[in-house]
Image (cartoon, helix red, strand yellow):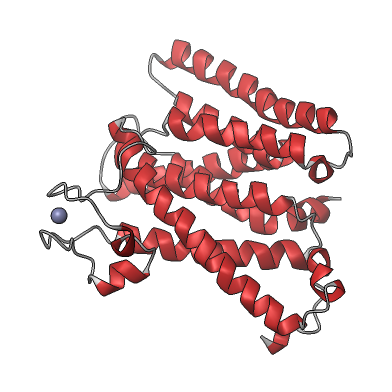
Amino acid sequence: MFFFQNMPLCPYDWWFRAGFEYTACLTFALIAIFIFGSCWGSFMNVCIWRMPRRESVVTAPSHCTSCGADIRWYDNLPIVSYLVLRGRCRACRTPYSCRYFIVELVMGLLFCAFFIKAGLSRQEPGVLASGWVMLLFALAAAWIDAQHRIIPDALNYPAMLLGLLFAGLLPEVWGTPVWHKALLMSFLSGVIPGIFLAVFAVGGEKLTKKEVLGWGDVKFIMACGMLLGLPGAFFILCAGSLAGSIGGTLAAIAGRRTLKNASIAFGPYLAGAAILWLFAGNFLLNGLK
Ligand SMILES: [Zn+2]
C-alpha cells in the first residue's frame, strides 16, 4: 500500500482529520469495500438467475436450483463458501455455475477499483453510490442479455429509481446544492435519450418491418442517464452500439450467417461502455474541452 501514500485521495481526507493513520485506514477501507462489493455481487447472482424466470429476488430464501435444499447462511458467504464447498451443493453435490464465484470476485474488485478511481480524480464522495449501482446494474444486465436476450424491467426500473433517489439525496454530484434541480437534471438525462431512442426504435421497426432496438436496451440507456448524466448516457449509447455492430458483424462472418438474420445482444456492449465511462469518463470529457 506504500504507493498510495503520496497520492491525494482528497474526498476521503476525513480519515486524517479523524486522526487515523493513512495507510492502515486505506487498507481497512479496501478490505471492507471488497467484502461489501462481493456481497452485492452475491445478490446480483440471485437476480441473474431469477429475474429472467420472473421469480422474486426478495421473498424466497436462497435455495439449490437442482435439489431445492435451502442454503444456510454459512454456505452463502460470497467467494468463501464457493471455495469451501468446491463449487458444489452441500446436500446433493451438484456443481454450481462458476458464474457465482466470478460475479462475486469481479464485483469486489470493481468496487475497490472505483473507490480508488473516484478518490484519485477528486470526485464527490456521492459519486461512489451511483457508480457502484451502475457497476452492479451493468454486470447483471450484460449477463442476463447474453443468456436470455432481454434486459428485464425488474433491473431497469430499480436502477432508474436509484438514480433519481441519489440525485435528490446527494445533489452536489450534479453540481448544484438544490435537491429538486438535481432531481430534474437526473430525470431529463434519462428521458431525453429515451425519447430519442423510442423514435428510432418505432421508426426503424416501421421501415424495416423488424425490431431494430429492444425496449430493454432503451430503458437501460435511460437508467444510465439517470445514474450518470446526459454525457454518460450518450457515450454509452454511441460506444456500445459501435462496439455491438462491429462485434455482431464479426460474429456473423465467423458463423457464416447472413447479417440480416444475425441478432445481436447489445446488453454486454452497452454494459462494457458503461464501465469504460465510469473509469475513463471524466478523462474523455476533459480531453474534448
Ligand atoms: Zn442441491
Q: Residue furthest right?
A: 177
Residue 247: x %, y % from top left: 43, 48
Location of the N terminus by quadrant is bottom right
Residue 6: x %, y % from top left: 81, 83
On the question of residue 4 being in view, the answer is no
Which residue is at a point 58% across and 65% down the rendered structure image? 33
Residue 139 in the figure: left or right of residue 116: left
- Quick check: 252 above or below 113? above
Q: Nearer the viewer, residue 191 or 20?
A: 20
Residue 56: x %, y % from top left: 35, 33
- Quick check: 41 above or below 165? below
Residue 4 in the figure: left or right of residue 138: right
Which residue is at a point 65% across and 46% down the rendered structure image? 130
Residue 198: x %, y % from top left: 56, 19
On the question of residue 77 being in view, the answer is yes
- Ligand 1, seen in the image, is in the quarter at bottom left
Occupied quadrant, residue 149: top left
- Quick check: 130 above or below 153? below
- Quick check: 16 above or below 256? below
Q: Residue furthest top?
A: 206
